Structures are given as structure tokens and as C-alpha cells.
Image (tube, coloured by chain):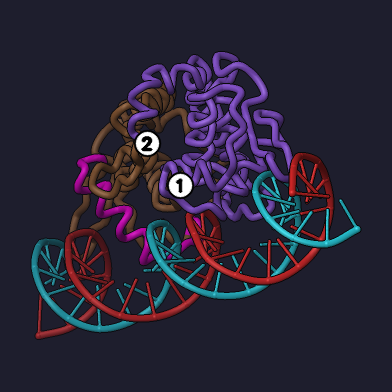
Chain colours: A brown, B purple, C cyan, D red
Amino acid sequence: MRLTTFTDYTLRVLMYLALEPGHLATVPEIASAYGISENHLVKVVHRLARGGVIESIRGKGGGVRLACDPREIRLGRIVRAAETDAAIVECLAPASNTCRITRACRLAPILLEAFDALYETLDAYTLADLVANRKAIRRALA
Amino acid sequence: MRLTTFTDYTLRVLMYLALEPGHLATVPEIASAYGISENHLVKVVHRLARGGVIESIRGKGGGVRLACDPREIRLGRIVRAAETDAAIVECLAPASNTCRITRACRLAPILLEAFDALYETLDAYTLADLVANRKAIRRALA
DNA sequence: TCTTAAGGTGTATCAATCATACATCTTTAT
DNA sequence: ATAAAGATGTATGATTGATACACCTTAAGA
């Protein structure tokens, strides 16, 4: 069980933006700060913008910035949105499920409850908590 | 984020064995009951046996059965053991980590806490809970 | 003691999906 | 008009998980 790189990068983008609230950052700028793929970040940023978490400004002089205060951005909500695609287990994807005991077995609801607990725990933290040590992060990215 | 088929099959094997405690089941028998790969099940069963969750008896007339009462088999422990391989996120795999802000960033401990909450929630349930509706499961596998 | 049925183990291959690149379009400042 | 920025869709590459296969070991029973 692991988070996709997509989710990982999502969090990195948000942390970067939280370092300098208000500053318009470009995708190439963020990608080079972390030394990661610009192309991949484009999609991460796009999804964040669609979700309203960040604000994107097109055209020359454009860029992206947080749409709200880092203290209001709960990690559970972010990770849930980023990890949206896959079903946790076969029987939770009715379209492709082939397990014969799905009707009778109690696994699905129990798993959902457990993942709710995971996301709730994450929701106890905000983006601001991730970058509590702002100075050290800035230094690492310089 | 999702469980591997390996974990899924692990739970299915245990549920099958819990239906008829004491009965020695063979791998082909379990595989055909669920209509899944016999080869893959072999490894699942092997790992369960190594972990002491089930007891395996080699040779003709052999098979596998639960090593203890289904009410004592906690789901969190089972899933944790099955999902052992992958790191949740890059920075939790020091050997291959390339993230520049690992030192300063608080993501790793927060994720560990959240996954602990997940497994604790699973540990509130046992194998017996999964097969509470034993008759219906037997019917589905017949 | 030979055969057969069972699990144990390692390797190889296939397939899925995630990560990444590329091409092109749209928007906006200058 | 041009350049710089994000938006979007498609294609490719690489990882790894799922599966198959081959062969070994163990033990029952004829």
C-alpha cells in the first residue's frame, strides 16, 4: 500500500506554495526546485487548480498560488482528492469485481471504515503543519 | 491507494478456512472455490504458514487449516503483514529517496500516524467478523 | 519401496498502471 | 504581434505486481 507519486508531488507543490504565500510560482520553477519532472507537475498543478485549492493565472507573468491560508488546507482532503482513482480492493469496484462472496462478506465496509480513520487522522493536520519548519525547507530547496 | 491482490487473496484464504474450522483444505480446493489462480494462492498460503496464522501439512492427505480461533485473528495484523513490501511514500524508503526536503518536512511521521490509525481500526475486527454470515458465504462458494 | 498427492521454492513472463515526454492549443502581458 | 505562461490530449517507457511454470521435498498408502 502506498501513495502515488502524483499524491506525493501534490503535497510538494502545496508545500512550495506555502513557503511564500501570495508569490506567483511557475511550474518550471517548482519542478527545478525539487529536481522533478516538469511535465508531471503540470498535471498535478492542473488538478489542484480544478479543485480550487490553488489559483492559476494563465498567460505571461502568470503562475500559481494557494487559494487560501495554509492553516485551512487539511491534508486528508488533499490526499483523498489526489488518490481518487483506484478502488482499495477488488470488491469495492463493482464494475470489475469478480469475487463470489461479495454479497455475504463484511470486508468492504470494514475497509471503508479503516480508510476513513486514516483520512480523519490526516485531517487533523494542515498544510501549515507540514511546513512548520519553513526556514529549513527553504534552505533545502535553494 | 489500494491493497494488493496478494492481500485480498490472503483474506479470502482465511475466510475460506474459517468456514470449516479444523477441516484440512488444499490449495486447488480454495482456488477453485473462488475461481482464482492456484499458482498465486500457493504463495499466499505459504506466507500465511510462515507467519504462523495457518498450519500446513505436507504430503498426501495434507492441506492447510487455521492455527487458531478466527476470533483471535485480528485483521490489522493480517493486512499489515501482507502489505509489508512497499513504502507508503518515497521519503519513507531512505534507500531510494530523492526528495530534497525530507529532513525538514513533517510528512513522514504524519503519514505513519495515519496508517497506524488505519491498522488500529482494522484490528478492532477479527476474521470471525468477516465470516459472520457463514451460511451465505458457503452458498456463494458452492 | 514405489507411486502419488500434497505443499515449498525459485525463476520467468505477462500485463497493468503509473510516471514521463511530447505536441499543440489557449490565454494574457507587453 | 510576440512571448510566456497554463491547459489538454496522446503516446511512450519503466516499474512492479500478477501469474505461470518447472522442479524439489515431504508423507501416505498400496
The kind of secondary structure element at disc 1 is helix
Q: Identify the image quadrant of the C terminus of chain A.
A: bottom right
> Which residues are the magenta region?
A33-53
Is residue B33 visible in the rendered structure shown here? yes
Q: Which mark is residue B142?
A: 2
Mark 1 residue type: Ser
On screen, residue B122 versus residue A79, left or right, reads right
Q: Which mark is residue B16?
A: none
* Discs 2, 1: same chain: yes
Q: Which quadrant of the view contains residue B137?
A: top left
Q: Which tag, 2 or 1, sits closer to the chain's start?
A: 1
Q: Is residue B5 above or below residue D20?
A: above
Decide whether the magenta segment is chiefly helix, strand or loop: helix
Residue D17: x and y in percent read 51, 53
Is residue A36 covered in magenta?
yes
Instruction: Classify 10 Å Cα crowding around label 2: few (below 14), some (14-19), many (20 and above).
Output: few
State the residue in front, B124 or A64. Answer: B124
Identity of the residue drawn at 33% across and 53% down: A44
Q: Is residue B112 above or below residue C13?
A: above
Instruction: Classify 10 Å Cα crowding around label 1: few (below 14), some (14-19), many (20 and above).
Output: few
Q: Chain of mark 2?
A: B
Is residue A58 covered in magenta?
no
Is residue A71 visible in the rendered structure shown here? no
Residue A31: x and y in percent read 43, 60
Identity of the residue drawn at 71% across and 30% down: B52
Mark 1 highlights which residue?
B32
